[in-house]
Structure formats: C-alpha cells, structure tokens
Amino acid sequence: MPKTRLQWILILLLVMVVLIVPLFIFPPKADVQQDDPWLYMPKKVSHTNHAPLIQGPFADGPSVTKKCLECHPEAGKEMLNNVHWTWLGKPVLLPGRKDSVRMGKKVSINNFCIGIRGNWPPCTACHTGYGWSDENFDFSNENNIDCLVCHDHSGQYVKGKSGIPPKDVDLVAAAKSVGRPTRLNCGSCHFTGGGGDAVKHGDLDRSLDFPPERVDVHMGKYNLVCVDCHKGENHQIRGRLMSVSADNENQAYCTDCHLEKPHQDERLNDHTDAVACQTCHIPKAAVKEATKIKWDWSEAGQARPQNPHSYLKIKGSFVYEKGITPKYCWYNGKSDHYLLGDKIDPNKVTHLNRPLGDINDPTAKIFPFKVHRAKQIYDKKYNYLIQPKTYGKGGYWTDFDWQKASRLGMEAVGLKYSGKYGFAETDMCWPLTHMVAPKEKALLCADCHSESGTSRKGRLDWKALGYEGDPIFYGGRRVKSHKSNVSTNGEAD
C-alpha cells in the first residue's frame, strides 16, 4: 500500500512538472493591442445651417467670400498660408544642390500639360481662388479666396477659367448650403487633374464620388470622406504628393489611425518595417476607370480621328490602362525632382521626380507607384525641357506652332529658347495610397514570393530592390529599424 501511494505521488508530481515547466519556458504573451482606427477619427462638430444666415444676392465669388469673412475673419488669414492657395511649399534642399528651392504646382514641370506659367486660366480653374489669370494675381487679397469650392453642398457649384464660376451658377444657393468638405468637393479638382477624369492619379478618379467597397474600402464600406484622413487644423490640410512636393512634412499616414503592427498574424506584422501598408492593400490601381500611362506630345497637330483616350490634335497620342499593377520602389517619403533649366540627356529617360530611399535606408519602405511616361518638347541647343505656351494667343492649342509656343513659354518662365526643339522621353512616379481593397483582396504570400526563390513568378523584382533574391530564401535586409532599433534581417522582409 505505501509503495502504491508513493507511486501515485510520483506520478502526480511528474504530471505537475509536465504542465508547469512549459509555462516558464513559454510564458503567455501579453495581451495584443487591438487595431481600432475609429479611436483616431476626427470629432465632427455640429453643423450650422447657413440658409437663414445668407441673403444675397452676390455679384461674384469674391462677394460671397467677403460675406463668409464677416463671421470667420480668421479663416482668410489661415488660407493665405495654405498650399491650396499658394501652390508653393516651404524651401527644401534637393539632393546634389547647394541652394534650397520652393516646390509647388506654381513653378513645377510635369509630363502631362507640362506647366502653368503662361497657361494660367485653364490650370487655375482648380485654384482655391478667383481671378488668377496671369503673373500679377494678388495672393494677399483675402477676398480672392474661394470658400465655396471646398464647402459647397448645393451640387451645382463649378469653376471656370481662372477659377471664375460660370454665370449660371447660383451663388446664393451655394452659400446657403455650405458645410464640411465632401468627396465631391475635393474630387472636383483632385479626381480630374490633368484635364480629365482619372488622367493623372492612378488612385483618384470620379469613381470615388460614391464608390463600392471593392473600389475603396474606406470610402465605399465606411463612407469616409477625404478630410477624415487629410485632417485639417486652421485650414492647414495634412497630405503631401511627390509630383509637386519633395519632403514629407505634414504628411498623412495609415498609422495616424491604424497600429504600426495591426495584424493578428505576427508573420504579417514582421513585414511592416520594410513594406508599406499600401503595397499589400492596394494590389491594383485604376480599379474602375482607366488611367493615362503614356502621353506623346510629338504626335500633336496631326489631322487624325479625335478620341480623348487615344488622340487629340492639341495634345498628341495617349495610352490608358485599367487595373494596372503598380511599380514598386523603396520610398522614405522624400523625393528628388527635375527643375526647369536642369540639363537633360535626350537619349535617356529624364526622371521628373524620383522616390528617395533604398534597401539600406532604415526609414524607407517598399511602396507602390503608378508611372506615367511621356515624350515632351525640349531645347536641342541648351538641352533642357521646354515649358511651352499652350493656351491663349500664340499658344500651341491655338496656332499649332511649336516655335511660337516654345518662345512664348520660355519667356514666361525666364529661360532662353534657342529656336531648335526636339522631343525627349520622361517619366513621373505617382504614389498610390487610395483605392484600398477590402482585406480579403489584399496580396497573399504567393503574389510576391515564389517557390523557386526567383522574382519571375512574383510581382516584386527582388534584385532590382537590392536583394540577392526572394527574401524567403536569401534573407531580408540587414539594417537597424529607425523605430525599434532591432534587426530586420528575417525572411519576412
């Protein structure tokens, strides 16, 4: 009997050891913080009905603004420093340059309609002001600010050349309707940049006015509006676009609402030091509407059948594509830019902007881009790009004369024109951060990683990104994280 009792005691002790020891070897993980983006959504203030406060009539847009400023005097002063008004950022030092420059739509060159100087009226139709028709526009006059373009809820307010509303716009109805900006307000310019719907951005077009969930989960399923993410304080709106900005100051990020490591699966969280949220969650650009990916100005002026998606005499030939697979690059939120007057090699592609960062930059992540390629006019003697005059008297769209358009355009930007022109290839990168797919449609492991360890089956070109091969087989980048100071050399990168 004592022997049997001893045996049972020993068995009980053995069972306790088997159960307890693993608890010390593998202690339970602390509670994982749940990703709850709703905690960080902006608080919406009660709306004031302006209908009984507004009487009218109003002779013009500035008359409406003058009325607005009676109750919101601070708004005018705040808007004078808003980049939607100035179209200029703060001075920034670009790589390889000695002096800082101010970037912005006011002075930049692109490979769509090229530049605004000398072409103000059609370009400034999307300016948050009234009357910017030439270089003499008064940026200090608060009455020139257009309040309605961001706050109209009447649905009939539009802007024409130089930002002036057409005569059939009911300014009283627009002023009575004002409220918090909607997607329709922001989209009236941002969805149609470059002269039409879906032209410039691969992730912004009129399908986002009222999108289904499959086009954008934030706007479609949860009915978010632009200013929920691009939050504003004192009329300073968060956000940066590398087509006209070089820095990441005041940028809007996914992690403004989501956790840095939001997934329940730690294998996915291990990617976030090297892979941007957008890379997995925006598998395709131009989800519903085709976007422009190529523009050849050298073919303009020909007597050919007109089609806004393939050829226009005033602009040349185009290529549009829908459902495009992004190009992936390292990106630390900053970019380099071509500036007017910079020399080019016409036998090579000129990068009008370029995302900065590489595999050795701990602040850089793999990020998705739309790339727009073009062939645009340049000076064959001075070897720099020409910003031609396209609109109005002497403009190419009027006279179809590249000599005259080049001379007048370069006079507007203060650069010499030799009288000899040609056409050179350029490209621009456009970051993709909208049209976020439902989580069920995010990229899977096999979309990027392949069984053979090569890049041929997956969508990422590992060697072009600086890896020896697929990180599953060759290991990830070996840099110190700028946030956690832990090595990220694992297969997850």
Image (tube, rainbow, N blue to C red):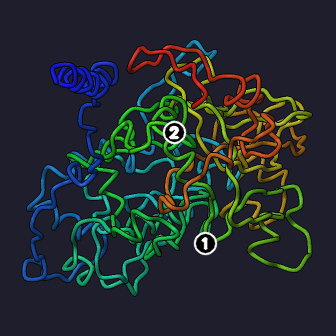
Occupied quadrant, residue 385: top right
Mark 2, residue position = 276
User: Which is more N-terminal, label 2 or label 1?
Assistant: 2
> Could you say where residue 422 lies in the image, as x and y percent from the top left?
90, 44
Tell which residue pokes out farthest to the front in this image: 1
Dot label at residue 288 = 1
Report the disc number at residue 361: none
Direction from residue 196 to residue 402 in the image, left or right? right
For residue 114, above or below residue 207: above
Badge 1 density bin: few <14, some 14–19, many ≥20, Cα 10 Å: some
Q: Residue at x 74, y 65 (%)?
A: 321
The percent position of residue 127, horizontal first and vertical second, equals 44, 58
Residue at image x 23%, y 53%? 41
SS under mark 1: loop
Quarter of the image where one finds residue 261: top left
Q: Nearer the viewer, residue 233 or 322?
A: 322
Q: Which kind of residue does numbered mark 2 sit on?
A: Ala
SS of the residue under disc 2: loop
Q: Toward which corner of the image does residue 410 lie, by quadrant?
A: top right
Q: CA distance from mark 1 to mark 2?
A: 23 Å
Q: 126 or 39: which is nearer to us?
A: 39
Picture coordinates of residue 343, whole percent (x, y):
78, 26
Q: Is residue 166 above or below residue 128?
A: below
Residue 36 is situated, as x and y percent measured from the top left of the image, at 26, 50
- CB within 8 Å, label 1 to label 2: no
State the residue at coordinates (80%, 64%): 318
